[in-house]
Amino acid sequence: MVTTHLLYLHGFRSSPQSAKARLMAQHMAAHHPDLVWYCPQLPPSPREAMALVASATAAWPSDRMAVIGSSLGGFYATWVAEQRGCRAVLLNPAVNPARDLEKYIGEQTQFHAPEEHFYFKAEYVQELRDLACGPLRQPTHYFSILAKGDEVLDWREMHARYQSGKVLLLEGGDHAISDFAQHVPAVMAHLGQSPHVFIV
């Protein structure tokens, strides 16, 4: 099934201005102009973030939509895919963000706009727990790109969580997947779209 609606979810302290989000937006505009692309700035509250996504994509056809998520966005993307039964691409996804983000309670800044501040509240940790999903119901819907060189998250934990689906395990690499451009064709193939030669 060809994907006609694509959602991109950024990570913690990130934004639609991240390198991967911008690369995907450019690729969609150049090669898939008819595809519906949605990459929102997510609010700090996980509950509000998923309410925003659920509302914005409510009319999307579940069998022709897909979600891409990076880091915390990968955790969110899992929730979306489990709710909708759609395909998902996960880029170094957070597995247990409630545990990992507890130490970030307090004022934070955005990576791509350091002048932008937000407050990560203690209750957001429970909101993350509330969004946690069990075993993947349709593992074949998932394609995970995991970097062994991820300096933020443990690739072994990610692999254990998502190994029932399709996994591309990168030797080395980093949390940002800095060579993401070369993996876009594999991402598009998973989404049922013609991969095209990717040109930065």
Image (cartoon, grey):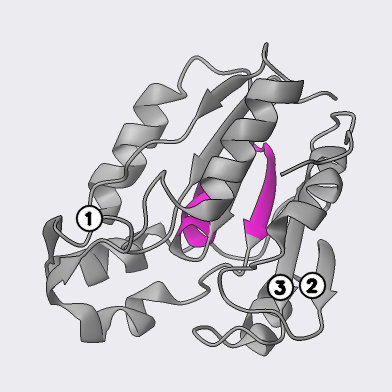
Q: Residue at position x 36%, y 58% from top?
A: 14
Answer whether labels 1 and 2 touch (C-beta < 8 Å). no
Distance between mark 1 and mark 2 Cα atoms:
29 Å
Q: Residue at position x 16%, y 69% from top?
A: 108
Name which of mark 3 and mark 2 comes first in the sequence: 3
Q: Main secondary structure of the magenta part?
A: helix
SS for dot 3: strand
SS for dot 2: loop
Residue kind at label 2, given as amino acid type? Gln
- Vertical comparison of 117 with 163: above or below: above
Residue kind at label 3, given as amino acid type? Leu
Quadrant housing the N terminus: top right
Q: Disc 1 designates what residue?
A: 44
Please tell me how crowded label 1 is: few (under 14), some (14-19), or many (20+) other residues with Cα within 10 Å: some
Magenta-tinted stretch: 73-90
Location of residue 143 in the rendering, given as x and y in whole percent from the top left corner: 77, 55
Distance between mark 1 and mark 3 Cα atoms:
25 Å
Location of residue 3 in the rendering, given as x and y in whole percent from the top left corner: 74, 25
Q: Disc 2 designates what residue?
A: 163
Quadrant housing the C terminus: top right
On whether residue 195 falls in the magenta region, the answer is no
